[in-house]
Image (cartoon, helix red, strand yellow):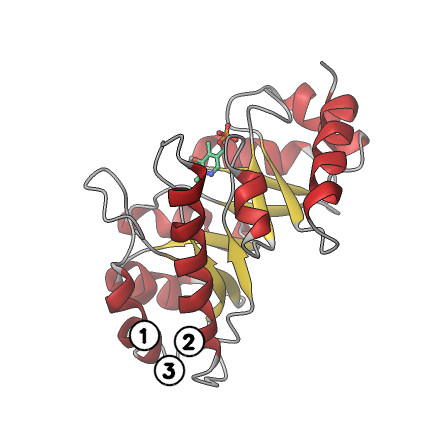
């Protein structure tokens, strides 16, 4: 299907569960530049990539009005190759990465702290109980703004269990926001992908990252 039709289906579904439409990030990691351009032409303005090469390639090809989200795990030694092209980093998942971003970035990077809510071995991110201390430790970092928290949900069918994970991240987001730290407004929640975005939105997601169902 073309991106425009996919987007319409997704927007209609979103409208059925909430009046607060989240920002849709088109995850273009599986597709060509032409398909990403089709997404842009369909009206999408937020794009996500999880690898440096694809990120730089899509960013160079699309109009400069597009906003670019780096959503994949980022190796410390590669930060300098990409960080100054990044609008939003969704994968701030360890102190050494924060230190390197602070050192290399020439503008403030909007960051999501990645949280491994379900405690899966295969997933990156802080354990929920580590998040507050990590954010407090970022006080004084000038190149990092903690705009929110991000999670990747486990691949499970049980929507009730999924929703408890999303709700847990929301609660944690509110705790971080309540710190009142100047570089950590933490108002946003990056959660929800092709298989689970309706549950994520129902629990307050403000950024959904959609690949398969939107662009293929
Ligand atoms: C690939 C990816 C997505 C999109 O996944 P789909 O299931 O194709 O929608 C979202 N977030 C991250 C971090 C990803 O790597």
Residue 5 lies, with reference to residue 205, above or below; the image says above
Taking the image as drawn, is residue 203 in sight? yes
Tell me if residue 142 comes above or below residue 57 in the rendering: below
| Cα–Cα span, label 2 and label 1 | 8 Å
- Outermost residue to the left: 121
Residue tagged 2: 175
Q: Going from the N terminus, do you reach mark 2 or mark 1 first?
A: 1
Which is in the foreground here, disc 3 or disc 2? 2
**Circles 2 and 1: CB distance less than 8 Å?**
yes
| Residue 132 image label | 1
Which residue corresponds to mark 3? Answer: 139
- Of 102 and 166, nearer the camera is 166
Q: Nearer the viewer, mark 1 or mark 3?
A: 1
Give the mark count: 3
**Residue 112 can be seen in this image:** no
- Image quadrant where one finds the C terminus: top right
Q: Earlier in the sequence, mark 3 or mark 2?
A: 3
Q: Quadrant of the N terminus?
A: top right
Q: Position of residue 88 (x, y in %)?
A: 53, 55
Q: Secondary structure at mark 2?
A: helix
203 relative to 45 in the view: left or right? left
Look at discs 2 and 1 and give the one toward the viewer: 2
Question: In terms of secondary structure, where does tag 1 sit?
Answer: helix
* Residue at screen point 37% across, 82% down: 139
């Amino acid at each position: 299907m073309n991106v425009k039709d996919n987007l319409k289906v997704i927007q209609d579904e979103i409208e059925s569960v909430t009046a607060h439409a989240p920002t849709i990030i088109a995850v273009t990691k599986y597709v060509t530049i032409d398909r990403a351009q089709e997404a842009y032409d369909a009206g999408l303005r937020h794009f996500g990539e999880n690898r440096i090469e694809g990120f730089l390639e899509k960013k160079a090809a699309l109009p400069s009005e597009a906003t670019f989200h780096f959503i994949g795990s980022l190796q410390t030694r590669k930060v300098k190759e990409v960080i100054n092209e990044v609008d939003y980093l969704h994968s701030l998942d360890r102190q050494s990465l924060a230190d390197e971003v602070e050192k290399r970035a020439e503008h403030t990077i909007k960051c999501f702290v990645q949280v491994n809510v379900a405690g899966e071995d295969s997933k990156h991110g802080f354990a929920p109980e580590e998040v507050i201390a990590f954010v407090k430790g970022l006080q004084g970092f000038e190149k990092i703004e903690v705009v929110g928290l991000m999670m990747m949900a486990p691949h499970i069918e049980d929507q009730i269990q999924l929703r408890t994970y999303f709700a847990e991240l929301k609660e944690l987001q509110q705790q971080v926001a309540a710190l009142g730290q100047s570089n950590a407004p933490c108002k946003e929640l990056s959660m929800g992908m092709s298989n689970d975005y309706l549950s994520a939105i129902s629990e307050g997601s403000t950024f959904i990252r959609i690949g398969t169902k939107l662009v293929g």
